Image: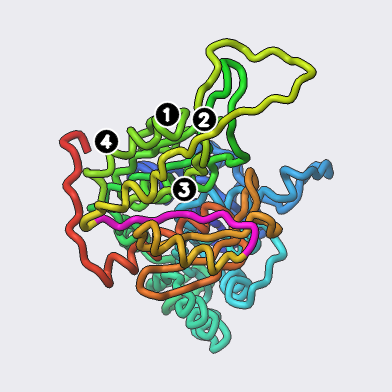
Amino acid sequence: MRITLGVSGGVAVYKSAELVRRLQQEGHSVQVVMTRAAREFITPLTFAALSGQKVITDLFASDGKANLESAIEHIAVAQRTDLFVVAPATADILAKFAQGIADDFLSTLYLASAAPVVMAPAMNVNMWQHPATQQNIATLRARGVRIVEPGEGYLACGMTGPGRLAEQEEIIKAIQQVVLEKHDLARETVMVTAGATCEDIDPVRFLTNRSSGKMGYAIAEAAAARGAHVVLITGPTSLDTPKGVERIDVRTAAEMLQAAQEHFPSSTIAIFAAAVADYRAAEPSRSKMKRSKESLTIRLEPNPDILATMARDKGDRLVIGFAAETDHLAENARMKLVAKNADLIVAKAVTAQGAGFNVDTNVVTFFAGDGREAALPQLSKPEVAQRILEEALRLRAALPRKPAAHGAGD
């Protein structure tokens, strides 16, 4: 799991160094983000040496040479974070998180991230017991933040009482609980189709579309992170294979159908995110077609409907399809939900800002078989992927199904 460890300024900062080492021993990748105050207690070099990763200290480039990469780094870190841990969490950082203040990298990252959050407060006993701090704690808890209560004892300020950073074992226990909760797909086998297909006209030309595969890959990565065995059937793309995912490369719609037919029986959830070409050349030329001054007519024939073909005999599997529309989004999505025998259609208007092809965001609406419809705001594709999986789990709970067993090598 990729953990971002936020370190805010308090005398307990030195304990965070050992926490980095412990998290690595648990098998996690750790990147540290430090506030300005934290750097008064310990240097970034210490955490860089322990984690083996860059330590982020500023919202913008500290050398005054700000660029686009540094300006949006908090978004990039937020998207690749599986778990956000803050230890120690000072009264100041608790207040910023609770009130939505974003004036440094750590507080901005909190607002930009959709990952679960674990916070371990540490401060003076009076600061901990102050009504403002307790109200901030209550606000954060209500938003789903897991708070690891501070321990009691002798504090650095000379006072005795609650306020010292919780013992490392308590923090690790809270993190492990979150990790287990996020493995809510551990008994599932998820098949995902992604990307565009290519249909040859001749040996050098083909029909395709603008799909980048980013949405399907985000779904595959998110499902694997939540414990599922994932089979990703992908058209041609430059994207890297997500960690822990079994990848099967195909080129044409016919090849994608064949791969889907092979892996669909062992799946419990099938998500058809690929943008499959609707038509193919009826008679592809075996040699390159030469340019001429005459008009050229190419006869096309329909490709197989992969979603409809597989969902026809879906049995106890959960089937999710996508609909990319230019108009009448809701009407077309509802028709597709019924016609394809799907449990959920994820529909997007491809002309809407932030929802087109080959971009990093999406704007979608869910149309579920149980009648539920939910429009999501513009989100990153990893965030949309998580929402799709949450909706899949909701449908699973409403209609219990028997998960298929994983293979012997899982």
Q: Which residues are magenta?
A: 317-327
Judge the density around disc 3: few (<14), some (14-19), many (≥20) Cα neighbours within 10 Å.
many
**Which numbered disc flags the more N-terminal residue, 3 or 1?**
1
80 in relation to 352, above or below: above
Q: Earlier in the sequence, mark 1 or mark 4?
A: 1
Q: What residue sits right under mark 4 in the picture?
A: 262
Bin the neighbour count of mark 2 within 10 Å (Cα to Cα): few under 14, some 14-19, many 20 and up.
some
Question: Could you tell me which secondary element the residue under label 3 belongs to?
Answer: loop
Q: Position of residue 401 (x, y in %)?
A: 20, 62
Q: Which residue is mark 1?
A: 249
| Res 273 label | 3
What's the amino acid at mark 4? Glu
- C-alpha distance separating marks 1 and 4: 13 Å
Identify which amino acid the numbered label 3 is placed on.
Answer: Ala
Q: Quadrant of residue 403?
A: bottom left
Q: In this figure, which residue is indicated by the disc labeled 2? A: 236
Residue placed most toward the observer, 402 or 53: 402
Residue closest to the far top? 287
Label 2 sits on what residue type? Pro
- Is 319 in the magenta? yes
Is 214 positioned to the left or the right of 188 in the image? right
The numbered mark, 4 or 3, whose residue comes first in the sequence reads: 4
